[in-house]
Image: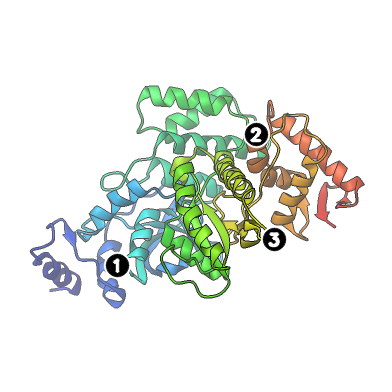
Amino acid sequence: MSNTKHFVDQVLTDVNLNPDYVAIPQDNELFTLKEQISSYHHPEYETAEYVKTDIVSVDHFRLRKNVGRFKGNDQKVYDTVAKSLEKGYKVGKLPPIVLQKEDGELENWLVNGNHRHAWYRINGYSTMIVDVYRRKEGAHEEDVMDEIGLLHQPQPDGTSSCYEDYKARGIAWVERQKNDNIIVTQESVDTWVDKYAANECSLTRANLKKHIGNNTVKQSWMTNYTRPDLVKLYDEHGFTITDRDKKIKGQVVNRLFEASQTVGTLRGFLPVFLRNAADGIKTRLHFYINTNKVKDGAELLRKIDERITEIEEVLESLESFDKGNIRLRDFFEYGYRPPHIIDTDQVDTLIPLVKVKEKVVEDAPVNMSDLTLLILKSKFSKDIFTASEAYDAIFPLRSSVSKFKDEASFRGTILRELQVLERKGLVIFVNKKGLYRIR
């Protein structure tokens, strides 16, 4: 009897397991399960080919992006996946997919299987099994995401792609064609939708064709975080998040709140803030957003801005009752948010909370160039950047406070502001190729 067959026979004797599942082993025992999975049929995709099945450290993968899902990881999706994994490893099920780079190393993000990876991490697994694929010649990395991460997103014991996933990936495809100087027609959009949304009904595909064809503004994909993920991320950047009932050590306490709802934030923040201030302890307030509660990066930033405005109003009201030289504001400061917005937020870096005090229209006053400079400094520091990179960095925040009739209007406004900053000597135009840097 082979080791693989003995392993399967042994785990199937466990009366607590469904016979369609085997116990998920840890570490060294994974080699036997890997052999079993290696023998499964692995599909040959149009954009990528199977290389091998391998065992990889769970920590190798960063929580950066779920390439098939517009709003990142989803708690409801995670719960569905968890119910399956708690039964064990499903016999015949293929593992998550990772791409192999040209140098043979593996990418640090998954093409699919992000929710399964989250389950392994949360449940203390140090290693996991993956299928390794490599891009076929002529295929773009984004094409692999469309085919494997979107069209072939695992469905039976996971969850299918949703409308927003198709829409956002379709818009990204349009942008990719434009960047390659390929003319995009409604017919080509229709072809893309029919190919990658083949599992959807005709009405859904018709709506996707309309919305993708009419959309001219780049959408911001988002990364969703669980609270344990965030506590770890902030700790890595030197901020120990303290829950409200824990004893505080030192003169500054770091608090982290989900910022999508008014009542929850104020109710959770104010009592502990006032109590800490009375004890002479300063509060550093950090925000994050559950991306399932916002439609895009612009709304995410707008929600945080709303919470900051509310807190500012409360502080101003409370300070009107202060006596002597005591100011509540001396016991409060704004902290950071996680890098929610893919391609505009720098990966693995906390983003400073910025308060935008003015709501403006398309013809922005000159002082909006100060906001543009602040965003550029937080994104590029001393790095050289192009105008296009500046547009992508600035758009999520500016679109939440300014109105632009189309993308051309937005780019024209930002270009004028770059010229204003150049005249002030705050931004340097490096050369005629359109390169800039912060002075």
Q: Return the residue nearer the eye: 79 or 166.
A: 79
According to the picture, the residue beneath numbered tag 3 turns out to be: 325
The residue where tag 1 is placed is 34
Q: Is 73 above or below relative to 240?
A: above
* Mark 3 surroundings: few (<14), some (14-19) or many (≥20) residues within 10 A: few
Comes first in the chain, label 3 or label 2: 2
Q: Is residue 416 left or right of residue 116?
A: right
Tag 1 and tag 3, C-beta contact below 8 Å: no
Quadrant placement of the N terminus? bottom left
On the image, the x and y values in percent for residue 352 come to: 64, 56
For label 3, the SS is loop
Amino acid, disc 1? Lys
Q: Position of residue 313 (x, y in %)?
A: 61, 44
The residue under the point 61% across, 37% down is: 218
Residue 188 in sight in this render:
no
Residue in the foreground of this view, choosing between 430 and 118: 118
Return the mark for residue 23: none
Q: Which residue is mark 2?
A: 182
Query: At x 69% / y 29%, what residue is drawn?
Result: 404
| Residue at 59 percent of width and 49 percent of height | 318
Marks 1 and 3, how far apart at CA: 68 Å
Residue type, numbered disc 2:
Ile
Residue at the limit of the structure toward the front, as seen here: 323
Which quadrant of the rendered structure holds the C terminus? bottom right
